[in-house]
Image (cartoon, helix red, strand yellow):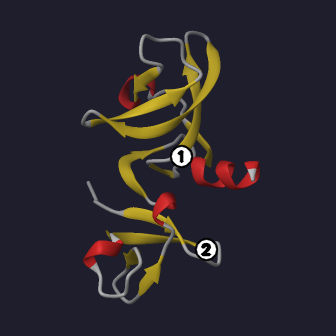
Amino acid sequence: MNIKFRGRRPNGEWVYGAFIPAEYTPLGYASIVTRRQRFEVDTSSVGQYVGLCDCDGREIYEGDVISFNYRRKRVSGTVRFVRGTYRVIGEITLRDNSLDLMSVFNAIRVVGNSYNLQEMKK
């Protein structure tokens, strides 16, 4: 599995590569680094690739909002890393309102990401 991250630049562009937190760079800001460049990113937008793709072939990242079939209905949730595993948090009625990502791997479709939804609410 490739360990890579996605983050949003101040100009709104999404970039993909290795993540360097602000405290580890002399520049004073969080960065996504590719083979050729370093990009400043908003730390709250950074998510790690989970190693899976949706039914359309799009890579799934932490923070993505996905929809999927669960108990004969279409539901959605946000991918989060919780207690050592990627989980779907959202409109699922379970004890802790989350579901292991691998248990819903049936027709998953990325429909957005939590960072864009936060911006839309502002």
SS assignment at label 1: strand
Coordinates of residue 7 in the picture (x, y in percent): 48, 66
Q: Circle 2 — which element?
A: loop
Residue depicted at x 40% and y 74%: 30
- Of the numbered discs in the image, which one, if any, rests on residue 17? none
| Residue denoted by label 1 | 64
Residue 6 in the image: state x and y as whole percent.
45, 63
Crowding around mark 2 (Cα neighbors within 10 Å: few <14, some 14 to 19, many 20+) is few
Residue at 29%, 81% (x, y): give it.
25
Report the side of 36 relative to 113 (left or right). Answer: left
Residue 12 occupies which quadrant of the picture?
bottom right
Q: Residue at x 74, y 48 (%)?
A: 121
62 on left or right of 114: left
Q: Which mark is residue 13?
A: 2
Residue 103 location, x and y as percent?
Answer: 39, 23
Q: Amino acid at mark 2?
A: Glu
Q: Nearer the viewer, residue 119 or 64?
A: 119
Q: How far apart in space, not on screen, are marks 2 and 1 (Cα)?
A: 16 Å
50 shown above or below 46: above
| Few, some or many residues within 10 Å of mark 1 (<14, 14–19, 20+) | many
**Is 7 left, or right, of 109 in this rendering?**
left
**Sequence-wise first label, 2 or 1:** 2
- Total marks in image: 2
Residue 13 x %, y %: 61, 73
